[in-house]
Amino acid sequence: MAKLFEGRSRAGRDPRLPPGQYDVGGGWPVLTAEPTPRVERDAWTFRVDGLVDAARTWSWADVQRLAATTWRGDIHCVTTWSKLDTAFTGVDLDVLLDEVGVSPSATHVVAWSSTGYTTNLPLAEVRGGKAFLVWEHEGQPLPREHGGPVRMLVPHLYFWKSTKWVSGLRLLDHDEPGFWETRGYHELGDPWREQRYDGD
């Protein structure tokens, strides 16, 4: 794959910026691989299945009854923009995974959206308070163009891993590359190691 993303000068860089990234400031670019769907809260569901003790599907009302948490920090897109010191509110994925009971044989997850988009992650990258389902940004409902009503948030990895309009998570005993990973993107996507493309 041709390397399309180029960073800006590193002179005077904010230390919160990973290599090759720039601060987008108050903006938040909208980038999607597919047309933006309209997913109504009352129709939205989230399913966790695969290598679990008991697969389960949550509704919007179900997740609203869970203990919400607010994460504040920096997010980074593989297209080189970063958004610093921003806040999302939702539920820690550990809460949902604990409810279904994760099989000891599970090593990876595949997240999917209502559009059919998928992305893969090692299970260790979504456990331990590293990943969330979020429905608010800066105290406001998550905009539809940014994945509302609910998206994944995996802030320590490039943002293509934070699936918009997320509908489910499947636990597997093997890796299963998703939409961008089958098109040459890195399997993990750590911004601090500039893991943009396969082989980085």
Image (tube, grey):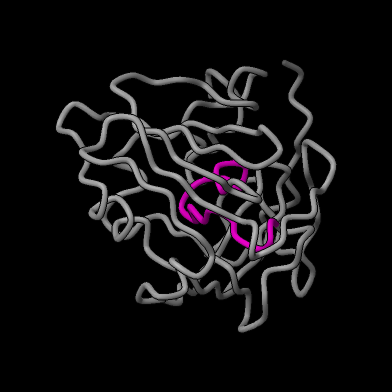
| Residue lying at the far bottom of the rendered structure | 139
Give coordinates of residue 70: x percent, y percent: 45, 77
Give coordinates of residue 141: x percent, y percent: 67, 75
Question: Going 50% across and 38% down the picture, which residue do you hit?
Answer: 111
Give coordinates of residue 189: x percent, y percent: 52, 36
| Residue lying at the far left of the rendered structure | 104
Q: Where is 48 relative to 45, above or below?
A: above
Tell me which secondary structure the magenta stretch mostly adopts. Answer: loop
Left or right: 4, with 15 as reference point = right
Question: Going 39% across and 43% down the picture, which residue do you hit?
Answer: 48
Residues shaded magenta: 147-162
Q: Nearer the viewer, residue 70 or 75?
A: 70
Which of the 4 image quarters holds residue 78? top right
Q: Nearer the viewer, residue 78 or 64?
A: 64
Give coordinates of residue 50: x percent, y percent: 34, 30
Q: Nearer the viewer, residue 1 or 16?
A: 1
Please identify the quadrant where the N terminus is shown: top right
